[in-house]
Image (cartoon, helix red, strand yellow):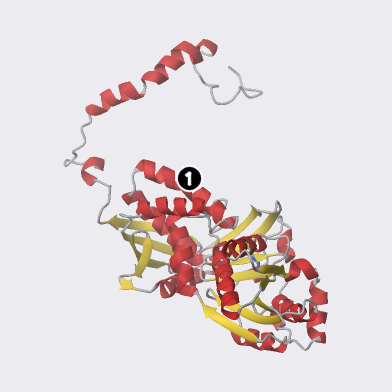
Amino acid sequence: MTEKIVLAYSGGLDTSVATKWLQEERGYEVHCLTVDLGNLPDMEGAQRRGEEAGALSVDVIDAKADFLNYFVFPALQANALYQGEYPLATALGRPLIGKLLVDKARELGATAVAHGCTGKGNDQVRLDVAITTLAPDLTIIGTARENEMSRDAAIEYATKHGISVRQTLASPYSTDENLWGRSVECGELEDPWAEPPEGVWSWTTDPGSAPDEPAILEISFEQGIPVAIDGERLDPVTLVQRLSDLGGKHGIGRVDMVEDRLVGIKSREIYEAPAAVTLITAHKALEQLTLAKPQIRMKERVAQEYADLVYNGLWYTGHHRDLAAYVQSSQQDVTGEVRIRLWRGTTTVLGKQAAYSLYSKELATYGDDDLFDQKAAQGFIKLHGLSVQVQAHRQLLRESKDLLHLAAPERDGESD
Ligand code: ARG
């Protein structure tokens, strides 16, 4: 009996070719699975190409809500940004796609799953690790890794087998899109000195030609989860999509960086993530009011660790479960509103309030209603500065009288 394989299918050239190739070269009965995480281009064309390529079934699963609730929002609560900039849209999608591939394979009694990720990227790692973790018995075929077809060879293969090639093929970039953001690599971007050509951007207006009139909105959070815009309660998909559209119009969320891939390559990447950038900015502002200083510090460290593990494909791990538990616990009082301005590529927080805010006007004020005991500061400073004084007199001042060069040596040409 012919063995079945489930292919993670985007509808693009590579996975359409893979559909045929898995039948011809590997003898599988191919079932295509497209996971809709939002912003999928050309779904109908994709379906058609899958059938043209001889897939026995082409299914689309709408996983948008699960994606936001179980993958994106926990990362938002953590303020996860890889290397301080990338909101991880592509990376967050992979463990879910891996799980849905496994579910489909089980449903069909398939013995294998396949994807079209290249052998140089992070996505293959994320998918393979997720799949082997959830289903060690399934064979994994990375079609691009194994057939090593060039772009031209893929086009030729498609034409030969009657698979229609979509016009956007003219695009020299490799892209990936979902609700949390759009990722672009390859082509002219490979030169980090070259400014990204305007055609790279697709969701966001150039900040220079964005509307002069800003958008000012109020975002409500409950325990670190965004729930409403301007007082209107919205389901997660509508809320994120709305911020994505509005932010895009105002040129918010453009990221241009050289990042360190897991496989050791430095790579120039472009991201468009208007909703992610807006929400992370607002969420951090609310945490300023609702978290104590050591919680904020710890959360910054956790954010880095969290971003790394998501980036590195370690979603289904105990380390992740434990970090996520800390993040969840930290969000208990992160409930409130943030007023934010989107204007020409910038997000500016204009105001914030929270029911359980730690901010106390009576302590902060310089006005008459001041409750802070200024005299108590003297005693505090005496103890705070005690060890500083001891060290300076016993050690530091032995070498130099005024400590001017404590942090940097004397520069050439400086007179003293
Ligand atoms: N460098 C990003 C990441 O590793 C984006 C990958 C984009 N994927 C793609 N198929 N174009 O998460």
Q: Position of residue 327 (x, y in %)?
A: 41, 52
Q: Position of residue 375 (x, y in %)?
A: 22, 27
Dot 1 surroundings within 10 Å: few (below 14), some, or many (20 or more)?
few
Q: Looking at the image, which residue is at 23% across and 27% down? A: 376
Q: Position of residue 368 (x, y in %)?
A: 17, 40
Q: Looking at the image, which residue is at 45% across and 73% down? A: 65
Q: Position of residue 306 (x, y in %)?
A: 51, 52
Q: Is residue 347 visible?
A: no
Q: Looking at the image, which residue is at 79% across and 81% down? A: 24
Residue nearer the viewer, 404 or 107? 107
Quadrant of the drawing holding the N terminus: bottom right
Q: Amino acid at mark 1?
A: Arg
**Residue 225, placed above or below residue 23:** above
Residue lying furthest front: 1
Residue nearer the viewer, 186 or 160? 160
Ligand 1's quadrant is bottom right
**Residue 358, placed above or below residue 276:** above
Q: In screen coordinates, is 163 left or right of 134?
A: right
**Residue 312, placed above or below residue 147:** above
Residue 116, quarter of picture: bottom right
Q: In screen coordinates, is 167 left or right of 372?
A: right
Quadrant of the drawing holding the C terminus: top right
Q: In screen coordinates, is 339 left or right of 67?
A: left
Total marks drawn? Answer: 1
Residue nearer the viewer, 225 or 71? 71
Q: In screen coordinates, is 80 left or right of 3?
A: left
Q: Looking at the image, which residue is at 53% across and 79% down? A: 61
Residue nearer the viewer, 325 or 92? 325
Task: Say which residue label 1 marks.
Answer: 301
Label 1 CB sits under 8 Å from any ligand 1 atom: no
Q: Is residue 351 visible?
A: yes
Residue lying furthest left: 369
